[in-house]
């Protein structure tokens, strides 16, 4: 991990995030860098100190990506602009690319007159912010973020759905949609023998395995997943719940006595849990373009998902990989869970490889987007010189 005082390398692209916490956006940013020709000239600035138990920093380091940590706390957060600007000037950055409310705000301020600034928006702000914070701080964060997004010269959304919603709600026109992609080299199918070995490893016998990898936050509606599973009462079945969040303790205490519901919590073995499962379930009411759904499809697990626009966007691209139920209709979801045997069984065909939903295509699109920005800047420079 580099110290900002010791930076001598020139980096073309600087990515800025709060931390490298093990969540979808952190994984997507790694994917963007990993398959980019700018990889050797890319670095990541993290604003806050990492949580050693919940970070992807080692995955970044394994790829040879330099991390520049500011290690700020909330009291020192307003020094972020000055520190980021100094780094951007030191490394002669051409583009700074941020995601998240705080990184977007300070990256926009720090990059002014220094380099170009790209924001990736990974959720619809109103749906996301007000389900993660108390009302008063949520209002402040929401207004700040919308103001930042409206000022952005280069705004990318992770799905066509979010682009359309931003346009409709806030009349923001200068948006490019680049859909999330899954690492098909990492999230791979396994054969039945390998699946049985994994099930033995996790002490899962001849059970029908339903799985959810959603965070335990209100908009994910984990309660709906659990209740539908209970009502379905599928013989010899088990529900695996991966992840944590504000709703975890409440739901754990409510359902902990039910033996075939397993609260796994945060884990580094998401791939293995997906590979040993039979059906993936998501009851979310809002998403960006959900990584969990893409990852399940990539390993060959059919998906049973709510009928929100972001889920529809996936099934429009890959139409034969699952079913949708009407959000909030727990009874309908329960019926589909009961009818799991008639879910599409995904064969050896790689449904994602030839679509826009794999990380290689996603990275290529970002590279092309960066090139257009830099070409535009160079052309403007030439025009000014010729005046």
Image (spheres, rainbow, N blue to C red):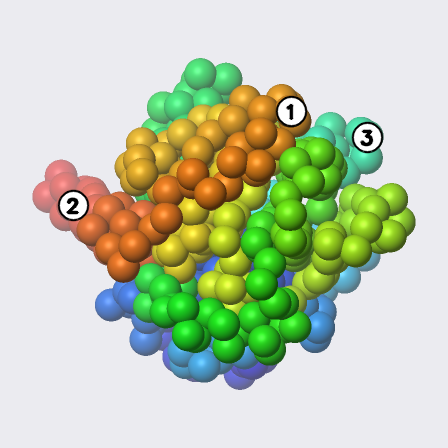
Residue labelled with disc 1: 331
Q: Position of residue 101 (x, y in %)?
A: 61, 43
Specify whether residue 217 is in view: yes
Residue 364 quadrant: bottom left
The tag earlier along the polypeptide, 2 or 1, is 1
Q: Position of residue 229 (x, y in %)?
A: 67, 40
Number of callouts: 3
Single out the residue that lies furthest toward the left: 386
| Vertical side of 293 occupied by 168: above or below | above
User: Mark 1 falls on what kind of element?
Assistant: helix
Residue 286 quadrant: top right
Quadrant of the snapshot with the N terminus: bottom right
The tag earlier along the polypeptide, 3 or 1, is 3
Please tell me how crowded label 1 is: few (under 14), some (14-19), or many (20+) other residues with Cα within 10 Å.
Answer: some
Residue labelled with disc 2: 379
Please tell me how crowded label 2 is: few (under 14), some (14-19), or many (20+) other residues with Cα within 10 Å.
Answer: few
Q: Residue at x 33, y 62 (%)?
A: 184
**Tag of residue 136:** 3
User: Mark 2 falls on what kind of element?
Assistant: helix
Q: Residue at x 20, y 51 (%)?
A: 354
Using the numbered discs, state the Cα–Cα distance from disc 2 to disc 1 in whole angstroms: 59 Å
User: Mark 3 falls on what kind of element?
Assistant: helix
- Mark nearest the camera among 2 and 3 is 3
Pointers 2 and 1 in contact (C-beta within 8 Å) = no
- Mark nearest the camera among 3 and 1 is 1
Between 116 and 265, the residue placed more toward the observer is 265
Q: Is residue 197 left or right of residue 255?
A: left
Q: Position of residue 282 (x, y in %)?
A: 56, 40
Q: Residue at x 65, y 27 (%)?
A: 330
**Tag of residue 206:** none
Q: Position of residue 140 (x, y in %)?
A: 73, 32
Single out the residue that lies furthest toward the front: 235
């Amino acid at each position: 991990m580099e110290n900002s005082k010791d930076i001598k390398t020139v980096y073309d692209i600087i990515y800025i995030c709060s931390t490298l916490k093990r969540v979808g956006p952190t994984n997507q940013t790694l994917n963007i860098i990993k398959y980019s020709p700018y990889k050797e000239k890319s670095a990541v600035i993290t604003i806050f100190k990492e949580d050693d138990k919940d970070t992807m920093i080692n995955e970044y380091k394994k790829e040879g990506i330099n991390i520049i940590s500011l290690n700020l706390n909330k009291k020192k957060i307003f020094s972020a602009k000055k520190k980021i600007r100094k780094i951007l000037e030191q490394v002669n950055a051409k583009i700074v690319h941020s995601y998240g409310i705080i990184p977007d705000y300070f990256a926009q301020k720090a990059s002014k007159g220094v380099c170009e600034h790209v924001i990736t928006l990974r959720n619809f702000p109103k749906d996301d912010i007000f389900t993660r914070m108390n009302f008063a701080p949520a209002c402040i964060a929401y207004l700040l973020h919308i103001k930042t997004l409206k000022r952005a010269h280069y705004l990318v959304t992770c799905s066509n759905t979010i682009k359309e919603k931003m346009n409709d709600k806030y009349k923001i026109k200068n948006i490019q949609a680049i859909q999330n992609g899954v690492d098909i080299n990492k999230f791979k199918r396994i054969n039945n023998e390998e699946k049985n070995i994994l099930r033995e490893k996790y002490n899962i016998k001849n059970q029908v395995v339903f799985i959810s990898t959603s965070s335990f936050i209100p908009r994910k509606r984990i309660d709906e997943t659990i209740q539908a599973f209970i009502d379905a009462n599928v013989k010899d079945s088990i529900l695996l719940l991966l992840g944590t969040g504000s709703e975890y303790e409440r739901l754990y205490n409510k359902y902990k006595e039910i033996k075939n519901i397993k609260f796994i919590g945060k884990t580094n073995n998401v791939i293995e849990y997906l590979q040993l499962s039979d059906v993936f379930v998501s009851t979310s009411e809002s998403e960006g373009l959900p990584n969990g759904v893409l990852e399940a499809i990539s390993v060959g697990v059919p998906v049973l998902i709510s009928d929100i626009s972001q889920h529809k966007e996936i099934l429009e691209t890959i139409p034969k990989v699952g079913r949708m139920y009407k959000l909030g209709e727990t009874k309908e979801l329960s019926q589909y869970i009961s009818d799991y045997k008639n879910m599409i069984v995904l064969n050896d065909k790689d449904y994602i490889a030839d679509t826009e939903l794999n990380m290689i295509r996603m990275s290529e699109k970002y590279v092309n987007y960066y090139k257009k920005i830099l070409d535009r800047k160079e052309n403007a420079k030439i025009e000014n010189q010729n005046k």
